[in-house]
């Protein structure tokens, strides 16, 4: 079994990262704090 993502999966992942980056750039400080807290509580961020 191969751990490497397929080219299609790589493309889709990059696409979602770009969409999320654009959305984050438009967020207020309060919204960013809420997202950061949510990511931290789910284990995606180590330092909060």
Image (tube, rainbow, N blue to C red):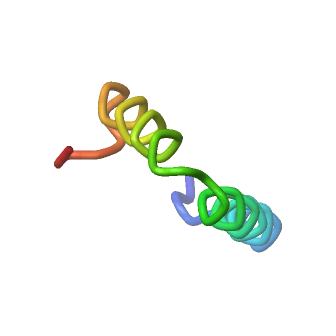
Split into 4 quadrants, where in the image is the C terminus? top left
Quarter location, residue 38:
top left
21 left or right of 45? right
Image position, residue 1 (x, y; %): 56, 52
Which residue lies at the image location 45% right of the left edge and 33% below the top edge? 34
Which residue lies at the image location 29% right of the left edge and 45% below the top edge? 45
Image position, residue 42 (x, y; %): 37, 27
Placement of 47 over or under 39, stated as above or below: below
Which residue lies at the image location 75% right of the left edge and 62% below the top edge? 19
Placement of 43 over or under 25, stated as above or below: above
Q: Nearer the viewer, residue 20 or 8?
A: 20
Placement of 25 over or under 28, stated as above or below: below
How many numbered discs sit on the rendered protein?
A: 0
45 left or right of 17? left
Image position, residue 39 (x, y; %): 40, 37
Which residue lies at the image location 71% right of the left edge and 69% below the top edge? 18
Q: Which of 34 and 12 is in front in this view?
A: 34
């Amino acid at each position: 079994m191969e751990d490497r993502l397929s080219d299609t999966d790589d493309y889709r992942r990059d696409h979602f990262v770009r969409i999320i980056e654009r959305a984050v750039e438009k967020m207020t400080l309060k919204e960013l704090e809420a997202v950061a807290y949510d990511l931290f509580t789910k284990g995606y961020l180590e330092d909060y």
